[in-house]
Image (cartoon, rainbow, N blue to C red):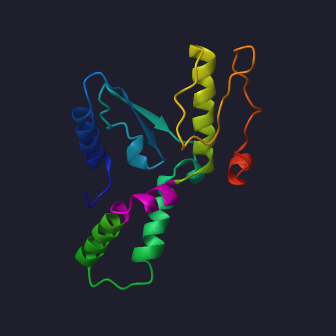
Amino acid sequence: MPTADTFCMNLHLAEISQTVDADVQVALVLDGAGWHSSQALRVPDNITLIPLPPYSPELNPMELVWLYLKSHYLANRVYADHHALYEAGIDAWNRFADDPDRISSVYHAAWTETAQLNWKWYQLACFGHQPANDSADPIRLEPSQAGVYSLPRAVTVSDVSEGVV
C-alpha cells in the first residue's frame, strides 16, 4: 500500500485475521506509529496488539530492515516522481526478500537469542523436558548425573553479542 494510515491498518489487520487458522491467536508487535493506536482501529478478536515502548527501535528488528533498504537501495538517488520512488521501493523490497541469508543477517537482534534461551528454560521448568536439539541451537541443556536438568548461569545480551553463547 502506498499509504500508512488507520484505514490501511484496518485492512491489514482484517487480512491477517482472515489468513490465519481459526484456532490461532496472533500477537502483533507494533511501534509507536499513530495509526497503530488510533481510536478508529478495528482489531479482530484473533489478534492481540503488543505495543513497543516509546523510543525503542532496538526492540523492533524491522527498523534494521528499513535502514538496510534505505542505505543499500534507496539513498543518494534522485527519483523523477513519486511513481519512480514507489517502484524503487518495490524493487528494493523484492531484492531483499529474495535473499534469505540477507534477511537473517539484517533482521538479527541479540535480544532474540536471549529470548530463545529463556523460552527453552521455561519449557524445561514447566514441562520437565527440553526442546529437541538441532545444530542451530546456541546452547545445550544437558541432564545432570542425577537425571535432573542443570541450567547454566543466566545469559546476558553481552554474552550473546560476544559469542560466549
Name which residue lies at 53% across and 42% down.
52
Give left or right: position of 138 versus 49. Answer: right
Q: Name, please, the residue furthest toward the front.
A: 145
Residue 6: % across, % down? 31, 46
Residue 45 versus residue 93: which sits nearer the camera?
Answer: 93
Q: Is residue 55 visible?
A: no
Q: Is residue 19 above or below residue 5?
A: above
- Which residue ends up furthest to the right in the rendered image? 153
Q: Is residue 75 left or right of residue 83?
A: right
Position of the C terminus, as image quadrant, is top right
Side of 29 relative to 161 (left or right):
left
In the rendered image, the vertical position of residue 48 relative to residue 105, given as above or below: above
Secondary structure mostly seen in magenta is: helix
Q: How many marks do you count on the picture?
A: 0
Between 26 and 33, the one nearer to me in the picture: 26
Q: Which residues are magenta?
A: 96-107
Question: Residue 87 colored magenta?
Answer: no
Residue drawn at (54%, 53%) of the image: 108
Q: Nearer the viewer, residue 165 or 155?
A: 165
Identify the residue at horizontal 36%, vertical 26% (top origin): 25
Residue drawn at x 49%, y 39% as measured from the top left: 51
Q: Quadrant of the N terminus?
A: bottom left
- State the image quarter where residue 119 is shown: top right
Q: Would residue 16 be visible to someone looking at this image? A: yes
Q: Is residue 100 magenta?
A: yes
**67 or 122, which is in the foreground?**
122
Spot occupied by residue 126 in the image (x, y as percentages of width and height): 59, 15
Q: Residue 77 location in percent, x, y?
A: 39, 84
Q: Give x and y (percent) for residue 69.
A: 43, 68
